[in-house]
Amino acid sequence: MIKAWLAQLGIARCDESQEAFILSVVDGPEIIVEREVGAWLMAARVGPCPSDLSQGTWLVLLQINGPFSPMLPFHITTDTRGEILLWVRLLESEIDIALLTRRYEALQEYYAYLHGLLYKDKPQNVPNVPRMASGAMQFV
């Protein structure tokens, strides 16, 4: 099935004995496709894990792996180099060309979202002014 899907993408040569290969996408991420026992893994490296993430950004990243994530069945992890990977597992018993295409397109869409979230240009020289709190109760 993978070979037929790759042919549909215009990639005619594929050795079915290969355990992994990389698809280069114009203006997009490199897509890693790797065979596992009874499944295929499709992943994209988003980039290095930034050291200056806000608490809100961390919460967004953590929610991706949660059971109610709008990005399900995608997950994120980091590799040994500290690179963030976005990945999805495709069971061989469920794979068809339509599913592969949907996951491939979703992987590119979610990659673009995460890349923008993590590496977008941050405003320079913005003063950090505390907001005035109003109301009877204030928590310290």
Image: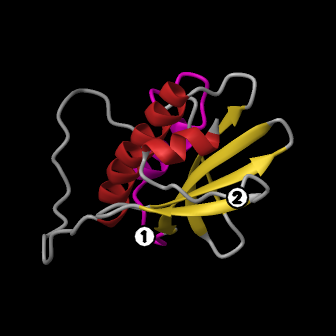
For numbered disc 1, what is the local secondary structure?
loop
- Looking at marks 1 and 2 on the same chain, the residue that comes earlier in the sequence is marked by 2
Nearer the observer, 16 or 36: 16
Colour option used: secondary structure
Label 2 crowd (10 A; few <14 / some 14-19 / many >=20) = few
State the residue position of label 2: 15
Tell me whether circle 1 and circle 2 mark residues in contact (CB < 8 Å).
no
Nearer the observer, 43 or 64: 43
Residue 20, x across and y down, in percent: 70, 60
Residue 50, x across and y down, in percent: 46, 70
Q: Residue at position x 57%, y 63% from top?
A: 22
Q: Residue at position x 19%, y 66% from top?
A: 128
Is 60 left or right of 80, judged from the image as shown? Answer: left
Q: Residue at position x 75%, y 59% from top?
A: 18
State the residue position of label 1: 52
In which quadrant is the N terminus drawn? Answer: top right
Can see residue 88? no
Which stretch is magenta? 50-70
Q: Residue at position x 42%, y 47% from top?
A: 9
Is 19 left or right of 11, judged from the image as shown? Answer: right
Residue 22 lies, with reference to residue 106, above or below; the image says below
> What kind of residue is marked 1?
Asp
Residue 89, x across and y down, in percent: 67, 38
Q: Is residue 69 magenta?
A: yes
Label 1 crowd (10 A; few <14 / some 14-19 / many >=20) = few
Is 134 left or right of 43, judged from the image as shown? Answer: left
Mark 1 and mark 2: Cα distance apart in space: 42 Å
For numbered disc 2, what is the local secondary structure?
loop
Q: How many marks?
A: 2
> What kind of residue is marked 2?
Asp
